[in-house]
């Protein structure tokens, strides 16, 4: 009886096909990946700013032919210096100089620099067929609100708040998924995020796991659509650090929904 109640608390929502907004979202993401200057496919390095990062000659922290630049931090403010010309480097905003694009992220004193440019990797996101049974609507059981440092989808370390758990079917039983409220860099917004592994991990989907957002509904319940599961950026470029699986967030069943994984050899796994 208890198991049946858990299923009712987070029952599948019927969907006939992939919703148009999801199709648009996927198309926009593929376009951004292929063309944006700060696409993960264009990243050359992710380095801690620390006492300074030099970009350019072979002996630099980040070798980059034809460039001689440096990024430094003083009292939390970042400066990009190119050809002895200094300019303020804002956080979470790509700055371009010729073929070089850099973006600073992280907190003052723990700043990271992502360097983009040069040859771009060739990878295209692809997905499992839309799965009606991978959509759930139900309640969020409150959490402890403890703060824990986690790596985001983008490979950035942030302070996340434990928002609670959702219980969903898993084979013949159920699984309780941990949900964190993760801040959006450079804004006051945040998202309810789940990072999970399942039976497809390393057998069709990315080995480290996938991220999916828990969406609030007007009636106070929440919607979990595993068709919207996404790979972390490290799936596209090993330059990015890969998140560690969250404790307990591992399905025993295979979730054939959401983003799949393409190996570096170009084959669909």
Image (cartoon, rainbow, N blue to C red):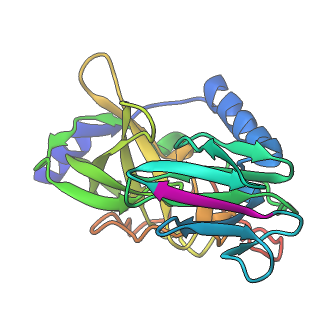
Quick check: 12 left or right of 124? left
Q: What is the x, y in percent for residue 112? A: 51, 60
- Report whether 112 appears left or right of 136: right
Q: In terms of secondary structure, what is the magenta stretch mainly?
A: strand
Specify the quadrant that holds the C terminus.
Answer: bottom right
Front residue of 43/21: it is: 43
Magenta range is: 68-73
Classify residue 234 by image quadrant: bottom right
**Residue 25 on the magenta span:** no
Q: Is residue 70 magenta?
A: yes
Q: Residue at x 36, y 36 (%)?
A: 190
Query: How many numbered circles are shown?
Result: 0
Q: Is residue 64 left or right of residue 103?
A: right
Residue 221 in the image: x percent, y percent? 26, 27
Quadrant in which residue 203 is drawn:
bottom right
Nearer to the camera, 248 or 15:
248
Q: Is residue 237 above or below residue 259?
A: below
Q: Position of residue 150 (x, y in %)?
A: 35, 61
Is 149 located above or below residue 230 in the figure? below
């Amino acid at each position: 009886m208890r198991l049946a109640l858990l299923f009712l608390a987070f029952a599948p929502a019927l969907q006939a096909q992939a919703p148009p907004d999801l199709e648009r979202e996927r198309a926009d993401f593929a376009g951004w990946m292929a063309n944006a200057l700060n696409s993960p496919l264009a990243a050359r390095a992710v380095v801690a700013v620390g006492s300074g990062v030099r970009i350019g000659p072979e002996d630099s922290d980040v070798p980059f032919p034809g460039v001689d630049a440096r990024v430094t931090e003083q009292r939390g403010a970042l400066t990009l210096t190119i050809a002895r010309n200094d300019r303020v480097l804002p956080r979470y905003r790509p700055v371009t100089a010729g073929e070089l694009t850099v973006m600073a992220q992280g907190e003052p004193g723990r700043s990271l620099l992502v360097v983009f440019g040069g040859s771009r990797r060739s990878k295209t996101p692809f997905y499992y067929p839309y799965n009606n049974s991978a959509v759930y609507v139900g309640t969020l059981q409150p959490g402890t609100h403890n703060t824990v440092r986690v790596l985001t989808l983008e490979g950035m370390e942030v302070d996340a708040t434990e928002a609670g758990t959702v219980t969903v079917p898993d084979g013949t039983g159920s699984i309780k998924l941990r949900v964190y409220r993760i801040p959006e860099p450079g804004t006051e917004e945040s998202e309810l995020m789940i990072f999970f592994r399942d039976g497809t991990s390393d057998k069709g989907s990315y080995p480290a796991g996938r991220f999916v957002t828990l969406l609030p509904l007007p009636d106070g319940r929440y919607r979990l659509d595993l068709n919207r599961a996404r790979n972390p950026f490290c799936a596209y470029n090993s330059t990015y650090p890969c998140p560690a699986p969250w404790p307990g967030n591992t399905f025993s069943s295979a979730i054939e929904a959401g983003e799949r994984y393409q190996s570096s050899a170009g084959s669909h796994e």
